[in-house]
Image (tube, rainbow, N blue to C red):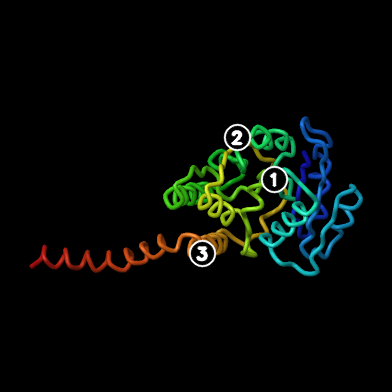
Amino acid sequence: MKLVISIPCYNEEPTLPLVLGELPTYLPDISEIIVQIVDDGSIDETAKVGESFGCRVIKHDRNLGLGYAFQTGVSVALDSGCDIFVNIDADNQYPARYIADIIQPILKNEADIVIGDRQPWKVEHFSPLKRFLQWVGNGVIRILLKIDSPDAVSGFRAYSRGALEKLHVTTSYSYTLETLVQAAKKGINIKWMAISTNPPTRKSRLSKHILQYIALTGLNFLRVLVIYEPEKILLWGIFSLLFPLLCIIILYFLLA
């Protein structure tokens, strides 16, 4: 069994050594572990840090976005014959010790995708607003996709080769929601695993502030749903247009 641990990076020179220093060099039932860095147009020494740790380094000439960096990592991993693919962030948010656990359901054929559940309501450095928004977002995904979704935007994930071959990310912003929608639509078996997180080392680079994150994540999720669940979007659109009209008609007859 060949395991590829992929780390999308954009100017991660300060924190990348923390992640690389904790990655496993041996795991039971794994014959080979390859660590790869997808340098998404960094202008610092991210690539050199990866090379100094003996990683496979894949470089984008310019910053294309997290979604494309993830897809590049997947493509290279598949071409190199990987059986299990683990994605972990370069900011040291996810403890690398969980890699041994997150691949177990795949090794046992119990799941094709395993997602690290940070249990957002328990994360101390998340603000009350962020915890609430996580709760709302996960609830919406449960309703629309009809799957369990305790931490839909977690970036710590393991994929079987079979799952990777069925998924293809088309957005530049992020891969987390799109792969979740595709997996639900295609009947790929998903399992969640409770994990803890490390203290934050920097602010998120996906957005400048919480409102921008909400807007970008919401628009990205809507775009993905339009592609993969057009009938649901159509029904919700019709409902949103007819509901106010229905309220007016009811109000008219009540007041008549």
Dot 3 or dot 2, earlier in sequence: 2
Farthest residue, direction left:
256
SS for callout 2:
loop
Residue 103 lies in quadrant: top right
Looking at the picture, does residue 248 appear above or below residue 28? Answer: below
Total labels: the figure holds 3
Q: Which residue is mark 2?
A: 110
Nearer to the camera, 224 or 44:
224
Residues under numbered marks 3 and 1 in contact, where contact means CB atoms less than 8 Å apart:
no
Quarter of the figure with the N terminus: top right
Which residue is found at the position 69% from the left and 41% from the top? 198
Q: Reading the chain from its start, which is encountered first: label 1 or label 2?
A: 1
Which circle, 1 or 2, is nearer the viewer? Answer: 2
Could you say which disc has been placed on residue 93 in the image?
Answer: 1
Mark 3 and mark 1 lie on one chain; the one further toward the N terminus is: 1
The amino acid type found where label 3 is placed reads: Ile
Q: Position of residue 116 (x, y in %)?
A: 62, 41
> Which numbered disc, 3 or 1, marks the residue closer to the eye?
3
